[in-house]
Image (cartoon, helix red, strand yellow):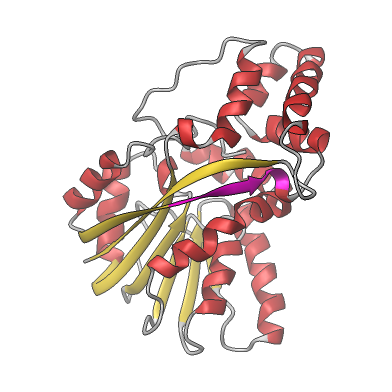
């Protein structure tokens, strides 16, 4: 659900990006509550050139376009051609209704992206945790940000405060041994201890960096019933491959166990579980 816990660029550019696309509607519906709090950190008004890095299918980019000044130029970049192609189609549809505000999407790697004119604002929702070479990527982002510009990144807080992830690992861990993920490896929990990210940003040349936390419940899969939510979770997390290697019967058993646990959290037509997100913002 949050990508493999040690994904490479090739994973995201290929099969992983396509897998994310297959779950995109449910994924974006689940993660949408974090969009507006993150956008609020960006101080959009006055931003003329705005980039969304690791933009996925473009959901957050479109939310930025809606909130930005009407004459702002909005750009979205991702390393997955499949996701970028989908985002381009969405933007074309939006442009018919709101001329002048549709984002421009392109394939781009945050560590190597080059543009002729810097950006006044840069945003990334749950993308920076997966940079293979974070120091290089953040140094490049600092160069992409125009003097006086602002950035805002959303990253997951500690696993203990993100029970929507913890419950999946707990459940699957009763059936198979899950690998220990190195603390500095690309993955969703990479900056749960946010001081790690703050050091990287300082080294890259960013300043006036602040952290605010968003806490709330996420609807798993955007409002799926317990069994469908369990299947969504198992399919999307890195544990899917570990289970698949053991055979379909074990996958089915994991879905059964997780569905039972999710049923205890069914509320207002969704499986709702708590989350904590670090909203990290600053400037150059």
The part of the image, by quadrant, that contains residue 49 is bottom left
Q: How many marks?
A: 0
Image coords of residue 191 (percent x, y): 37, 39
Residue 116 belongs to magenta span: no
Q: Which quadrant would the N terminus be assigned to in this image?
A: top right
Image coords of residue 81 (percent x, y): 59, 54
Q: Residue at x 79, y 35 (%)?
A: 226
| Relative to 64, residue 82 above or below | above
Residue 218 belongs to magenta span: yes
| Relative to 120, residue 205 above or below | above
Q: Which quadrant would the C terminus be assigned to in this image?
A: bottom left
Q: Residue at x 65, y 55 (%)?
A: 28
Bounds of the magenta segment = 214-221
Q: Nearer the viewer, residue 145 or 169?
A: 169
The part of the image, by quadrant, that contains residue 243 is top right
Q: Is residue 68 left or right of residue 197?
A: right
| Relative to 69, residue 281 above or below | above
Q: Nearer the viewer, residue 258 or 204?
A: 258
Q: Is residue 79 left or right of residue 261?
A: left
Q: Is residue 65 left or right of residue 46?
A: right
| Relative to 133, residue 124 above or below | below
Q: Nearer the viewer, residue 29 or 162?
A: 162
Q: Residue at x 48, y 36 (%)?
A: 161
Image coords of residue 67 (percent x, y): 52, 78
Q: Nearer the viewer, residue 135 or 81?
A: 135
Magenta-drawn stretch, dominant element (helix, strand or loop): strand
Q: Residue at x 21, y 59 (%)?
A: 206
């Amino acid at each position: 659900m949050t990508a493999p816990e040690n994904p490479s660029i090739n994973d995201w550019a290929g099969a992983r990006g396509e897998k994310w696309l297959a779950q995109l509607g449910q994924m974006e519906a689940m993660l949408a509550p974090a969009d507006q709090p993150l956008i609020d950190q960006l101080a959009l008004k006055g931003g003329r050139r705005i980039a969304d890095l690791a933009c996925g299918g473009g959901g957050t980019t479109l939310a930025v376009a809606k909130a930005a000044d009407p004459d702002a130029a909005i750009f979205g970049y991702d390393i997955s051609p499949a996701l970028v192609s989908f985002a381009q189609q969405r933007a074309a549809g939006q442009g018919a209704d709101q001329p002048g505000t549709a984002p421009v999407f392109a394939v781009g790697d945050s560590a190597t992206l080059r543009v002729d004119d810097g950006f006044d604002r840069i945003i990334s929702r749950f993308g920076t945790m997966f940079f293979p070479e974070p120091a290089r990527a953040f140094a490049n982002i600092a160069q992409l940000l125009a003097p006086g510009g602002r950035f805002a990144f959303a990253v997951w807080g500690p696993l203990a405060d993100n029970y929507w992830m913890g419950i999946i690992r707990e459940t699957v861990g009763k059936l198979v041994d899950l690998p220990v993920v190195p603390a500095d490896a690309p993955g969703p929990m990479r900056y749960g201890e946010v001081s790690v990210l703050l050091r990287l940003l300082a080294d890259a040349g960013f300043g006036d960096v602040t952290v605010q936390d968003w806490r709330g419940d996420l609807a798993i899969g955007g409002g799926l019933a317990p069994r469908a939510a369990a299947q969504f979770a198992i399919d999307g997390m890195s544990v899917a491959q570990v289970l698949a290697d053991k055979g379909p019967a074990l996958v089915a058993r994991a879905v059964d166990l997780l569905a039972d646990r999710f049923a205890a959290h069914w509320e207002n037509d969704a499986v709702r579980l708590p989350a904590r997100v670090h909203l990290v913002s600053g400037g150059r």
